[in-house]
Amino acid sequence: MKKKSSEKLTKRKNLLILFASSLNLNRSIRVPAFCGSEFPSMGVIVPFATIPEMFIRVTDRFSTSDRPYLMHKVQGRYRGLTFAEVRQQVEQFALGLAALGVERGDRIGIISESRPEWVIADLGTLFLGAFDVPVYATLAPKQIEYIFDDAEVKIVIVSNQSQLSKILKVLPRLRKVKNVIIMEDQYAGGDHLVLTFQQVYNLGMEFGSKHEAYLHRSLEHIKPNDLCTLIYTSGTTGNPKGVMLSHHNFASNIIASAQVIPFNHEDVLLSYLPLCHSFERMAGYYTATACGATLAFAESIDTVRENLIEVGPTVVTSVPRLFERFYNQIQRQFDGASPLQRKVFHWALHVGRRYAKAQRLGLVSSFLRARHRIADKLVYQKLKARVGGRIRFFVSGGAALAKEFGEFFEALGIKIIEGYGLTETSPVIAVNPIDDYKFGTVGKPIPGVEVRIAADGEILTRGPHVMNGYWNDRAATREAIDKDGWFHTGDIGMFDSEGYLVITDRKKHLFVSSGGKNIAPQPIESLFLRNKYIDQFILIGDRRMFLSALIVPDFDALRRYASSHGIGFDDDSDLVMREEIIRFMERNIQEMQRDLAHYERVRKFTLLDRPLTIENGEITPSHKVRRKIVEERYADLIEQMYRGLT
C-alpha cells in the first residue's frame, strides 16, 4: 500500500516537473506591475493588490526554499509541499480549468474539508479571473442546491466520495453545472461529468503546451475590484445570502491585519477551522501566506489536540469554543488531583496573574520573576506542551471570548488576542494589539477601517473592507449599507475610555421581558458557559415573565460527578432526569448568577440529553446557535418551564 502511494506521489511530481519545463515555468510568471494600494505593507513581505498577485510574489520569494508552505497528514505523519511545488500545482490546475471552459467571471463551487487541494482549487480559480463559492462540508444536499443554483456555478469541486454523492443527488437541478471535480485520485463511478484532480492536471498540461502565454494574459486582466469570492452567510434564520468580496476587500484587510497581528515567515500555523469560514480564509490562510508563513492542516476538529502536539505550531486562529474546552479539561484534571497538586496549580495561577499585571506596568520585581520561573517549570511548561510547546499566541474570532478565559490563559503564559468582524467586512474590523491587548474588548479598529456607534448602540463600519453587496439581492444590500457607505453590523457595542471596542450583544438578539426590561442574552450565556459542567447554554426569555434556559451538560464531567457520588444511571437520557443531578445543576446555576440583576437570573432550566449539532441544523458551522430553530424544536419543553408559573 505504501509503495503504491509512493509511486503515485513520484509520478505526480514527475508530471509537474515535465509540465513546468515544457512551459519554461521554472522561472517566475510575469505579473502586471503592482497596481498600488493606499495601505502600507509593514507586516506582509510583498506588495500586492490581488490575491493571485500576492501568491505569485510570495512563491517567487521562496521559490528555492525547501521550507514547506502547506503541510497535511499522509499515512500517519505530516508531510510538506514547498512554495514551488504548490505554485506548479496551482498553475497546472488553473490551466486544467481553462481546458474545461472556465472563463473570467465564472463561479466555481467548492465543498471540501480544509486540505492542500482546497488552496489549489481556490488559487487556480482566481488565476483565471473566475471566483469561487465555497460552502461548508457539513451542509445537506438541499442547502448546497440552493446556494449553487443561486450562484449559477459552472463547476463544482468536492473533496471525496461522500461530498460527491451530495452533488450527484441534486445535479439534475443544477442547470449551469458542467463538470464535477473530485480531489481524490480514484473515482469508482462512471459519470462522464466527474473528473479527478489528476485528470484536471493532465488536461492542464496538454492545454498549457498549446497556449504558452495563457496564464500571463489571464493574470493581466485581474483587477483589484474584481470579485474574489461569493461567501454565503449561514445565518441563524432564513435562506443564506451571498456576500460579494473583491480582491481589494481582501487585500486591504490582509495588509491592515498584518500590521496588528504579527505573523512572520518563521511561523507555523495550525488550521482547523473550515477555509470557507471568512475568518480562517483571510487570517489563517491569506494573511499567513502574505507573511510567508507555513500552513499546516489539522485532520479534523476532533483531532486538534493531537495535531497541536504533532505540528508544534507557533500561531493558531481559533474560535472561543476551543479555549472553553481546554479550560474545562484543565479544571477537571486539577479537581481530580491530590491536595498538594491543586495547591501548586492555584499558587502558579496566582503568580501568573500577578506577573502578567506587573509586566504590563513594567514593574516586575526580581522576587516575582524568580517565583514565575519556578511556576513555569512546575505548571506552565506542562500545560503549554498540550498545545505543541511553541505557541507565540492564539488569535480568537468568530464569537465573543469571555474575559475570564483570556485572563486565565494569560496567567499560564498562553496569549490570546481577540478580534472582531463579519463575513461582510472581509472580515476583520478590530483587533487587540499584541503588545497592548485588553480582555473583555475586541481591540481597536485596524488601519483604514472606520467605526462609529449609532444612536441605538449599533456598531457601524466603513472602509475598503466592506463588501460589494449581497448577490442578487439589492434590497438586502440597501438595508445593510446606507447611502453614506456605513455597513450596519447588527451588533450592539461601545468604545471604552481608552478607545477599545466592546461588543455587548446582537441587536436582533436583545430580549424584552414582559416587564419591559431589555436583556442582552450573550453575556449571561457566556457566564454560564464557564461552568465545567455546562457544554451548551441557550437562554430563553424574549417577551416572557422571566428567564429560563436549555442546557446541554458536559456529559464527561457530569458522568464523573454521578459516579463519584454514587448516582446510578443507564445512559445520558437517564442521567439528566435524575433528581440528584437536577438539584446539583441548580446549585451551580444559583452560585454563578449571584451577581446578576434579579431580572437577569435564570429561574427554570431543562437539561437536554444530547448536544445541539450542525447536522441537525441547530447551530451554524461557525457554532452560533440558530435560536429560532432551537426554540421551535424544543417548544414543548420551553412551555413546560413557564406553565403555571408567575
Image: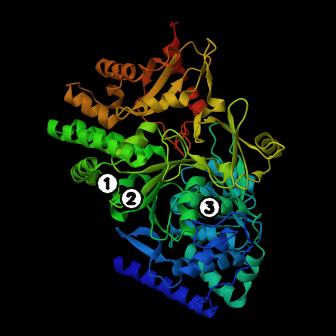
- In 3D space, how far apart are the residues under numbered discs 3 and 2 (Cα atoms)? 22 Å
Residue 113 showing in the rendered view: yes
- In 3D space, how far apart are the residues under numbered discs 1 and 3 (Cα atoms)? 29 Å
The location of residue 581, given as percent across then percent down, is 31, 22
Secondary element type, mark 1: helix
Say what amino acid the circle numbered 2 marks.
Answer: Ile
Q: Pick the residue in front: 479 or 7.
A: 479
Name the quadrant containing residue 257.
bottom right
Image height of 220 relative to 165, above or below: below
Label 1 crowd (10 A; few <14 / some 14-19 / many >=20): some
Q: Are marks 2 and 1 in contact (CB under 8 Å)?
A: yes
Q: Residue furthest right?
A: 483
N-terminal label among 1 and 3: 3
Q: Disc 2 designates what residue?
A: 391
The location of residue 6, given as percent across then percent down, is 39, 81
Left or right: where 127 falls relative to 43: right
Q: Disc 3 designates what residue?
A: 254
